Amino acid sequence: TESKYHGHGGNLKTRSTELGSAVTGSSLTAVLPASSTVKKSIVLSNESRKELAKEAKVTKEERRAQIDGRYRYLISRLADGIDLSEQQVEETIISDDKFRLIEQFFAPTGLKKLLFFYQDVLQQKSDASLRPDGSTNNLPQKKLFITMGSTEDITGTCAFFLRTSDEVITASNISQEVNFGMFDCTNGNILQGLEFFLSHIMIPALKSHQNWGAVKEGLKNSQIQEFLYEVDKFVSTLSSSRQNIEDKTQLTKVDIDIYVRNLQNPSDYITAG
């Protein structure tokens, strides 16, 4: 829209020509056959997927070449604890986006913990032939994966490795420098998993431990006894918290109807009160 009207034919023709060019240019993609655009997208998508699959295969083989005695130790512990084959665990680890965390865990003064979750994960399955609109199907499937523990909710099993020092982790010292444990947090019951781990594994192990380093008296030492007492008390607190969360503490239900059934006048209300 112009602020002034130009009556000359030349001006009007020029404006009309520019407008027609603008409209034609903007709507050019709209008049292209939709089928050719879709086919081109599908071809590009297939080529991209093939290229990504090729790169992923190369990455997996590079990681597989890195696997030494340290990795074998982790793989064997996970396979025993989660009831998977060592081959399954190895394939999972070398395919994981967070594979680098393992190397950071082995490094001197590296990560203090290495976490794995084994639980149901929604696996995205896209197949246009299965669904007319080409949308995705999300199916829950058990999966083992590396995690920092701060981004995913725990709904299954948590397997963890803890370092006991800042020494570099080698194939010869990994069994002494790294501890392995598991929490069963099925359905997100983290408190129950922690309570079971402490009461059935850690506390019995501590109470049967004989070598307490510089403390020569061992279990007879007052500080050791105080420490074990505090751990026991902590487990009791966990148990109480879990039971409260699970609605194990319930108030008695009162049938109020027997009190209000025969109320007729204000004096009856006073008496009931």
Image: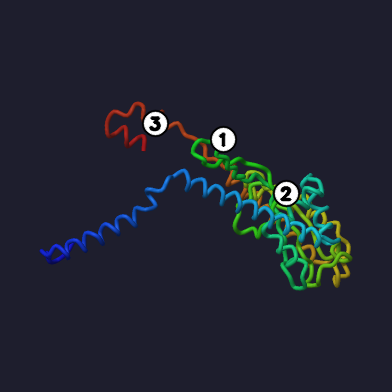
Residue 258 in percent (x, y) is at 41, 28
**Which residue does the image show at 59% across and 45% down from the upper left?**
124
Determine which of the numbered discs, if any, sits on residue 130 in the image: 1
Query: Three-letter amino acid code at disc 1?
Result: Leu
Query: Three-letter amino acid code at disc 2?
Result: Phe
Residue 181 in percent (x, y) is at 77, 55
Which residue corresponds to mark 2? 196
Label whose residue precedes the other's in the sequence (2 or 1): 1
Of labels 2 and 1, the one closer to you: 1
Residue 225 in percent (x, y) is at 79, 62
Q: In the drawing, does residue 214 fall left or right of residue 2?
A: right
Nearer to us in this view, 64 or 115: 64
Query: Three-letter amino acid code at disc 3?
Result: Tyr
- Residue density around tag 3, few if under 14, some if 14–19, many if 20 or more, within 10 Å: few
Q: In the drawing, does residue 100 fall left or right of residue 4?
A: right
Label whose residue precedes the other's in the sequence (3 or 1): 1
Residue 10 in percent (x, y) is at 17, 64
Quarter of the figure with residue 100: bottom right
Of labels 2 and 3, the one closer to you: 2
Determine which of the numbered discs, if any, sits on residue 259 in the image: 3
Q: Quadrant of the C terminus?
A: top left
Q: What element carries label 1?
A: loop
Q: Quadrant of the N terminus?
A: bottom left
Nearer to us in this view, 36 or 257: 36
